[in-house]
Image (cartoon, helix red, strand yellow):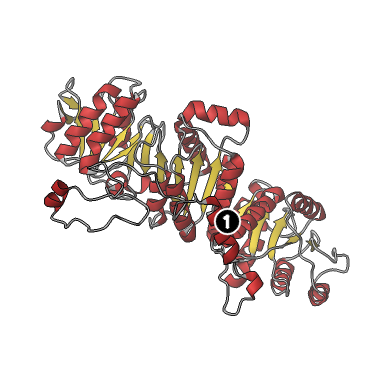
């Protein structure tokens, strides 16, 4: 169904909680508490016949008793009641609903869909955690904490992963534009979410946790369109036989061949990662360093050991180190001590003043090979790290756009890290993580190039041997066709309204649709209906 009425799901003007409660540790009580404390500015309605009021707000016995039509409803009631509630909400004018109820039978699920479809009411779930839209203070979920506002959208097939990710991201101070648990995705699925988020101005990158895809054509079409606009990063679980078996028991759908998913994700221009840590690492790299198209890496460091570690990490993930040109080496000789490394990694020695860092970086940026630069710094007592970070951040944006930072240490380099992040320079805690991030960037650009590929068109004047051999093709077709058939798809003759080999239109049918009967039998190979 695509994005129709999804604005009512993620940016509603009003919300109703069906099954809101005060019972401790209940889903209804948790959802009501999250909504009332999340900062949502629109009207909130509670529906529960057992209560007259909740937290000082009136509580209504039935959906029909609500003073207005809620744009979004959150259903926290037993499975047997869901279809009836959807029917009442649709009649009331509700445009979207989040169904948290678990344990629905196939018949109950179908009844729910049948109730929603005539009025185009969109459904998230069932059996999901819910959704969070921090930019409007909407927490329509039973998650244990809220999400911080940000520019990443996270869509997950696993509810448990949603709550774990929320907790981890809160500790890392990572914000989100949307946080969505699809559950059994009876209606809204990955394809719908990609279509919606691809044009969402608040979303800078889309993160997906996928166990199975039930509508592959829809997913691939949406993924290719979204990947043209912004980075789409995917964790696809079920790589092993054990993982696929666990995914089937979890979602009720077969996970499919991992090789097929791998090829499809790459062909759609998305990036596949293997862990939650890599998911956010890739998101930050693509957000800050996406325009860098370099295929090799230059390492600039004030410590030889850190440079060796980075070179080893690059070899493990097949990231080539740049071969510095003769002119670049000569320029570095002019500004660096005689005992510098004379190669890549470029070790400018631990006692380097601020000026030496800037000069070396500018020379490397002007190298004819134009490689990205990974800057690794270990703190010293000679020059404060913050001064170096300030000087490098002040370089032209054309130079810093090619720069990746790695400030080794803790409290001594924290100020320098914040300076880099404040100016939009990608920063990583270890050389290995920085190199791995660059490797992801290479894979992403290769997938993006594959996304734009199309079969070549034969130019005018193509040699005859390159064109298809029509005579051979015709011979193959004739060999496969029955002797008495004009085409291989000709069906067997069937009886029409009267026993004859000639398929005529029945007279009564002609009168109903006011058509003239044909004078001759049909010769298309297919009988008339």
- Along the line of sight, which residue is nearer the eye, 31 or 506? 506
Residue 131 drawn at (x, y percent): 37, 39
Mark 1 Cα-neighbour bin, 10 Å: few <14, some 14–19, many ≥20? few
- Along the line of sight, which residue is nearer the eye, 164 or 69? 69
Residue 44 drawn at (x, y percent): 22, 37
Residue at image position (83%, 73%) is 333
Taking 90 as reference, is 213 left or right?
right
Taking 156 as reference, is 121 left or right?
left
Residue at image position (67%, 54%) is 439
Residue at image position (38%, 29%) is 127
Could one spot residue 92 in this view of the protein?
yes
Could one spot residue 420 in this view of the protein?
no
Q: Residue furthest right?
A: 339
- Along the line of sight, which residue is nearer the eye, 425 or 380? 425
Residue at image position (79%, 50%) is 312
Residue carrying label 1: 476
Taking 518 as reference, is 303 left or right?
right
- Along the line of sight, which residue is nearer the eye, 111 or 365? 111
Residue 208 drawn at (x, y percent): 49, 44
Q: Residue furthest front?
A: 500
Residue 461 drawn at (x, y percent): 60, 80
Helix, strand, or loop for circle 1? Answer: helix
Taking 108 as reference, is 278 left or right?
right
Number of residue marks:
1
């Amino acid at each position: 169904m695509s994005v129709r009425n999804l604005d009512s799901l993620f940016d509603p003007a009003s919300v109703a909680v069906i099954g809101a409660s005060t019972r401790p540790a209940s889903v209804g009580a948790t959802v009501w508490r999250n909504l009332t404390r999340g900062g949502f500015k629109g009207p909130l309605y509670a529906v529960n016949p057992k209560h007259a009021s909740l937290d000082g707000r009136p509580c209504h016995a039935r959906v029909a008793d609500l003073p207005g039509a809620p744009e979004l409803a959150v259903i926290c009631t037993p499975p047997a009641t869901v279809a009836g509630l959807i029917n009442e909400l649709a009649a009331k004018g509700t445009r979207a609903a989040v169904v948290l109820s678990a344990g629905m039978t196939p018949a109950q699920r179908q009844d729910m869909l049948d109730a929603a479809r005539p009025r185009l009411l969109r459904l998230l779930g069932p059996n999901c955690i819910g959704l969070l839209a921090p930019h409007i203070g909407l927490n329509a979920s039973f998650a244990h904490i809220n999400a911080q506002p940000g520019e990443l959208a996270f869509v997950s097939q696993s509810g448990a992963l949603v709550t774990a990710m929320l907790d981890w991201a809160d500790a890392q101070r990572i914000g989100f534009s949307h946080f969505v648990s699809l559950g059994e995705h009876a209606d809204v699925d990955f394809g719908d979410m990609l279509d919606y988020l691809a044009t969402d101005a608040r979303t800078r990158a889309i993160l997906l946790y996928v166990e199975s895809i039930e509508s592959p054509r829809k997913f691939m079409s949406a993924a290719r369109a979204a990947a043209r606009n912004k980075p789409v990063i995917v964790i696809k679980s079920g790589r092993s036989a054990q993982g696929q078996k666990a995914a089937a028991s979890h979602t009720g759908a077969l996970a499919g061949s991992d090789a097929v998913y791998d090829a499809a994700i790459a062909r759609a221009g998305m990036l596949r990662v293997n862990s939650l840590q890599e998911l956010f690492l890739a998101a930050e790299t693509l957000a800050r360093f996406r325009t860098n198209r370099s295929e090799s890496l230059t390492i600039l460091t004030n410590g030889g050991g850190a440079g060796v570690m980075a070179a080893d990490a690059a070899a493990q993930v097949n990231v080539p180190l740049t071969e510095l040109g003769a002119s670049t080496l000569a320029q570095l000789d002019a500004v660096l001590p005689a005992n510098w490394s004379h190669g890549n990694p470029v070790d400018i020695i631990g006692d380097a003043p601020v000026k030496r860092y800037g000069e070396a970086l500018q020379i490397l940026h002007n190298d004819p090979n134009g490689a990205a630069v990974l800057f690794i710094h270990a703190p010293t007592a000679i020059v404060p790290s913050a001064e170096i970070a300030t000087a490098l951040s002040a370089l032209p944006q054309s130079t810093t756009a090619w720069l990746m930072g790695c400030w080794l240490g803790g409290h001594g380099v924290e100020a320098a890290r914040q300076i880099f992040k404040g100016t939009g320079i990608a920063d990583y805690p270890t050389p290995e993580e920085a190199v791995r991030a660059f490797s992801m960037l290479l894979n992403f650009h290769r997938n993006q190039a594959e996304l734009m590929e199309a079969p070549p068109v034969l130019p005018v004047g193509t040699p005859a041997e390159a064109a298809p051999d029509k005579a051979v093709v015709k011979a193959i077709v004739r060999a496969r066709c029955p002797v008495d058939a004009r085409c291989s798809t000709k069906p067997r003759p069937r009886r029409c309204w009267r026993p004859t080999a000639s398929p005529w239109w029945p007279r009564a049918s002609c009168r109903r649709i006011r058509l003239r009967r044909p004078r001759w039998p049909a010769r298309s190979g297919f009988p008339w209906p």
